[in-house]
Amino acid sequence: MTTEQSSTRTYDLLLKGGRVIDPANNLDDPLDVAISGRHIALVAKDISPALARTVADVSGHVVTPGLVDIHAHFYGIIGSVLPDAHCIPQGTTTAVDAGGSGHLTFDDFNESVINPSIMNIFALLNIVGEGMVGLPEQDIEDMSVDLTSAKIAQRPDRIVGVKVAHYMGPGWEPLDRGVKAADDTGVFVMVDQSPIHTRPMGEMMLEHLRPGDMVTHCYALSKPMTDVNDKVKPYFFEARERGVKFDVGHGSGSFSFRVAKAAIEQGFVPDTVSTDMHEPSLMYNQATMPETMTKLLALGMDLPDVVKRSTWDPAVAIGHPELGNLGQTALADIAVLEIAEGDFGLTDNGTGYRVFPTDKRIVVQMTVKDGKVVWDKNGKSRDHWSSTPPTNPALV
Ligand SMILES: [Zn+2]
């Protein structure tokens, strides 16, 4: 790398020599990416290093928009994680907290987590007033359509949808109230609901969700997409046909290689790739964005498609198309990915913790947020240590 101070330098940072995959702009080419201030200035071939104050050689690596994790947990549940510390080293620059807060707790979430974070953090507001705080999500009386809608209307800058999850009662009231609140405010619903006899999955997808609403944990064995013969159930295709979206939401119990492999082989790829990041999913399965993307590569999806469903598609799904792309003047949120080769084992859950051998793993080398390098695993943007100045003789 080189760093130069000169008034003739046009760009603050130049990522040079990488393979740029930017699905929103139909790019998959060897290109350089130049950044000025907080924004992308130019994506082009052979940008002169002389024009940049800092040049990072990213040859051999893949340069993508900063990853967008549409299902993570930073508030409310036991095991919530720290957004910057846990996401930025994994290339994630935008994440959505999936239902940790409700209309009663969103302001606290905003002040204690969203505002102090470097990352872009959005919220799916739980239909339950307290969100996932305490022992929640069972009391129908605490699921107010009006109060939830009012909070969404008050904070459309941060609240991008409604979350309905974990209800154990017999009926559809939580989901129907969540859909009503979302309908009143023009946002989508993400649902995490295991099927029971009185609430079958097919009825949920075909009769209660709207086009644009999203089913998370799509490859969970507890919400099985496949039958005993590993065939995708027809109503999943019907739901997709009518516009229902399907999200990975890896988690600590919601990703089965058996289900995912069969589904992907039968053409049922996920609409969005996400982690359901919290302490157990991080510890048991390294359920980060790059590791979850690696699993989809191992199951046969190609890299540009996986990148699209990890950047542009979730950005569009949350109504923020200014994110998840490397278009000129877009915010400079960028991930630099190494496709490492070796003997690796990927682990799943919910089925007794199996391993899936593979020879490639995505490793995040750099993360750029708002034009600043905020993660640099191998110091590609740094000067050599030998340029360290001598110790200050005034210090005793
Ligand atoms: Zn979750």
Image (cartoon, grey):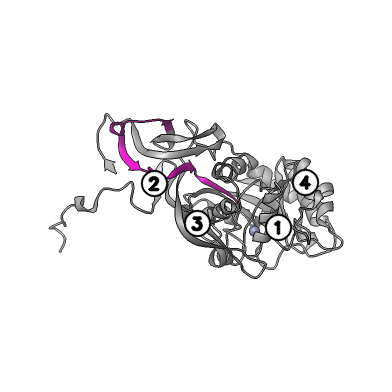
Going from the N terminus, do you reach mark 2 or mark 3 first? 3
Q: Earlier in the sequence, mark 3 or mark 1?
A: 1
Q: Residue type at mark 2? A: Val
Question: Visible in this render: residue 218?
Answer: no
Q: Disc 3 versus disc 4: distance between alpha carbons?
A: 31 Å
How crowded is the residue under tag 1: few (<14 C-alpha within 10 Å), some, or many (20+)? many
What is the number of the mark on residue 373? 2
Helix, strand or loop for disc 3: strand
Label 2 crowd (10 A; few <14 / some 14-19 / many >=20): some
Query: Considering the numbered disc 4 on the image, is that residue within a helix, a strand or a loop?
Result: helix
> Which residue in the protein does label 4 denote?
237
The residue beneath circle 1 is 129
Residue mark closest to the camera, 3 vs 4: 3
- Amino acid type, callout 4: Phe
Single out the mark in the foreground, 1 or 2: 2
Q: Which mark is residue 359?
A: 3
Q: Is residue 61 left or right of residue 192?
A: left
Which marked residue is nearer to the observer: mark 4 or mark 1?
A: 4
